[in-house]
Amino acid sequence: MRVTVVGAGVVGTMHAWQAVERGHEVVQIEREAEARGASLRNFGQIWVSGRAVGGELDTALRARELWEEIGGRVPALGFRANGSLTPVRGDLERAVAEAAVARPDAAVRGRKLLTPAEARALNPALRGEFDAALYCERDAAVEPRTAQLALRAELLKHPNYTFLPGREVREVVGEGAVRDDHGDVHTGDLVVLCTGAWLGGLVRELAGPGLPVRRVRLQMMQTDPLGEPLPTSVADADSFRYYPAYASEALDELNASRPQAETAAAHRMQLLMVQRADGGLTIGDTHEYEHPFAFDTVEDPYDHLTRVVESLLDRPLPKVRRRWAGVYAQCTDPGRVVHRQQVRDGVWLVTGPGGRGMTCAPAIAEHTANELGW
């Protein structure tokens, strides 16, 4: 079989990986010289802890297995099974963590409620005051800015894989065939469009105006090296408000009795933090849903994140060396992990994983391959 994959972000690259692994000939087309969207502008987290029970959690757990397997073959991915800690303060936050540990799915996520001393044994950098910490053993991380490059370097070892950058697919010209803006026609058995947050142009033409996917904007930052290890990923209790896995009466009480800080609420914020291979910290994030998006970044969210991080580390944050905004595509139905649609004979659109893209991409691609009978 000859498969054309359009898009070189993590979802597209994992589809190319699945096709090559199954012995197919693959042409991967990317409109930029390299992918520059949400696949690079994220934490690099394989985030199992907050995923909704059911299909979303099943997908995340399968993806976690695949990431570890691929990471063993491609060390440059920087895969590490680092787990995560969410420190909590006060009875209300602790009650949400206790409810999470009491859920039937706690064991498959590797959840435990730790004392401060136990949490610091895992992550000595957490010197700030907190009352307990929710641990999730199954969380992991890769290096988002270089993961696609590492995967592609491995793919390019295969004689049946071709990468064509700097080409935008403009037209479907037949079953399993597309034309790019160089005028070249790519003919095969199947086209998979993994175009991320690019939902206009050809995608709108093929899928129609009712595509059940929206765009979401975020702000993040990265620091100079911390100067010491941060062995686990770190979240704050605002992540309880954001992720569906923490829904409970205890969370309802937290929301009612102690709303988010004004800046966090205005920008729909949580703290997530991961240490990069160079020692710097990737820190975020915000969520903006209303169009049109702002074209600039604003400082209040960064100030808020800095205060939260410094309170947990009990030390000044290293110098911030990068700030950025990103946009990802998210299914409007929160119960769907991804939108997968046949838009023409031999042409499929796969988009809308939202903030789950980096976590779930390997399993999303595997599901596509299985469903389409590759």
Image (spheres, rainbow, N blue to C red):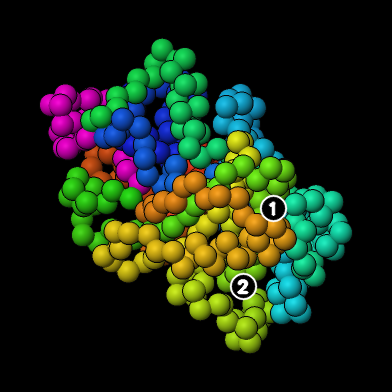
Q: Which residues are magenta?
A: 168-196
Question: x and y percent of residue 66 in the render?
Answer: 60, 36
Q: Residue furthest bottom?
A: 257
> Is residue 80 rendered magenta in the image?
no
Horizontal relation, residue 353 to residue 56: left or right = left
Placement of 187 over or under 194, stated as above or below = above
Q: Which element is circle 2 on?
A: loop
Q: Residue furthest left?
A: 183
Question: Sequence order check: which comes first, mark 1 or mark 2?
Answer: 1
What residue is drawn where x is 50% and y is 33%?
A: 147
Q: Which residue has dot 1 on it?
A: 84
Question: x and y percent of residue 80 in the render?
Answer: 67, 38
Question: x and y percent of residue 118 in the render?
Answer: 85, 57
Question: x and y percent of residue 151 in the render?
Answer: 49, 28
> Is residue 192 rendered magenta in the image?
yes
Q: Which residue has dot 2 on it?
A: 247
Tell me the mark number nearer the camera, choosing from 1 and 2: 1
What residue is drawn where x is 44% and y is 42%?
A: 40
